Image (tube, rainbow, N blue to C red):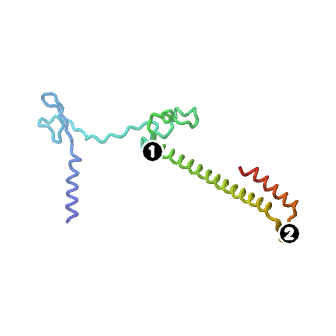
Amino acid sequence: MRRLSLLVLSLTLALPAAAQVYQWRDAQGRINYSDSPPPTGAAKTVKPASRPKAPVTDDVAPDQSAETASQKPATDAAAGEAGKPSEEKADPSKPKTMAEKETEFRQRKVAAAEAEAKAEKERQKAAEVARYCDQARSQIVGLKNSRRVTRFNSEGQRELMDDAARTAEIERSQRYIDENCK
């Protein structure tokens, strides 16, 4: 029962949408519109006006928005310029679309991440060089101050360094410090 009453109600509400509109001129020459015909009977039936459609330009397909169309380069202007953006897009006085702003934001974010990675790599390299410099300085101090210096040979055995080998090792460490530690 409830479904039947809803059906009747919906059909009743739909009747005014299907009603006819009449147009006629009265005795003073004015145009009148009404849903009922005039008493004289000389009227013309008019269809109700439908919603106007958005104008369609050559650049924009009916399903594209104006924002999307502003991003598309003009085909006529760009025909000889092979991929260059249209002049209206290059105009700095016009506001940028959200897509252009998003693209610029992502480009800035990528550039910042690359700069941060480069700076981190340089910091790591500087820390490594500083560590090697400290080791070389410590080695020079150890070679100069100790009386007996031993090191392991290729066979893993300890061998005593003579004065010539100590002097050569000090000179090698000093050259490294002079070249790399500033």
Residue at image x 42%, y 43%? 65
Vertical position of residue 53 compared to residue 80: above or below: below
* Residue 40, quarter of the rendered image: top left
The residue wearing badge 1 is 98
* Residue 79, quarter of the rendered image: top right
Query: Where residue 155 sits: x, y (%)?
Result: 85, 70
Of tags 2 and 1, which is closer to the observer?
2
* Residue 51, quarter of the rendered image: top left
> Which of these two is toward me, 83 or 154?
154
User: What is the three-letter code of the residue carrying label 1?
Assistant: Met
> Which of these two is toward me, 7 or 54?
54
Residue at image x 82%, y 65%? 147
Q: Residue furthest bottom?
A: 157
Q: Is 124 on the left or on the right of 146, as rendered?
A: left
> Which of these two is toward me, 54 or 10?
54
Q: Which mark is residue 67?
A: none
Q: Which mark is residue 159?
A: 2
Badge 2: residue crowd in 10 Å (few <14, some 14–19, many ≥20): few
